[in-house]
Amino acid sequence: MGINLSKGGRIDLAKEAPSLTKVGIGLGWDTNSTDTGVDFDLDASVFMVNQSGKIPQELYFVFYNNLKSPDGAVEHTGDNRTGMGDGDDETINVNLSKVDGSILELIFVVTIHEAKSRGQNFGQVRNAYIRLYNQESGAEIAKYELDEDFSSETAIEFGSLYKKDGSWRFKAVGSGYSAGLQGFVDKYIG
């Protein structure tokens, strides 16, 4: 059983899992029954940013249309368009030993596809979480369950892996935004 984090909580992977290089990032959620008449399609994305807080090139934005980073360190396993079933809805695999040396942070976000036109928001989503686990053993290292009601937000920054003092750490963020995926694109690519 891993560490349960609350918003803003942090762990140092060098202390919690010293030999870890292959990290699985599982993201999960359930949707409430709504009268929008359209199914939910939530999408996980990763922005791999450098010291300036930007991605060095567009290929360091890993999402359903770019499943692998150019350094081979981050791989998105594919878009789950329904979120049906138990367990992780989308998974991102990270090989920490392959992360380009200029990358200092991996920011994990989940957005609702076409949220505005579909009349959807994260207030209609429940049981949302991000978890880190050892890819080789399957052992969970940490989990953060979002417990806020994001009734107008269409995008959530779930958490980030970041490098500090030569070791990788994880922070549970849980910040909501109403600009959808484009807001993150403008922030980290613009």
Image (cartoon, rainbow, N blue to C red):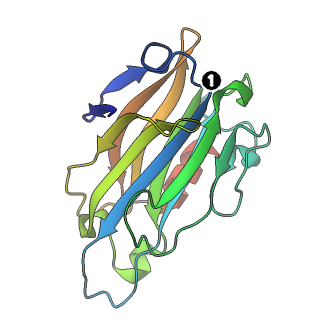
Name the residue tied to disc 1: 51
Question: Where 91 sits versus 164, above or below?
Answer: below
Q: In the image, residue 119 lies at what x, y percent?
A: 34, 79
Q: In the image, residue 141 lies at what x, y percent?
A: 41, 31
Name the residue type under label 1. Gln
Question: Where 186 sits versus 52, above or below?
Answer: below
Quadrant position of the N terminus in the picture: top left
Image quarter for residue 67? bottom right
Q: Residues within 10 Å of mark 1 (few under 14, many from 20)?
A: few
Q: Residue furthest right?
A: 70
Q: In the image, residue 116 lies at what x, y percent?
A: 40, 75
Q: Give the SS element for disc 1.
A: loop
Residue positioned 63% across, 57% down in the render? 77
- 95 vs 32, left or right, is right
Seen from the viewer's position, the closer of residues 87 and 49 is 87
Question: Where 36 sits versus 58, above or below?
Answer: below
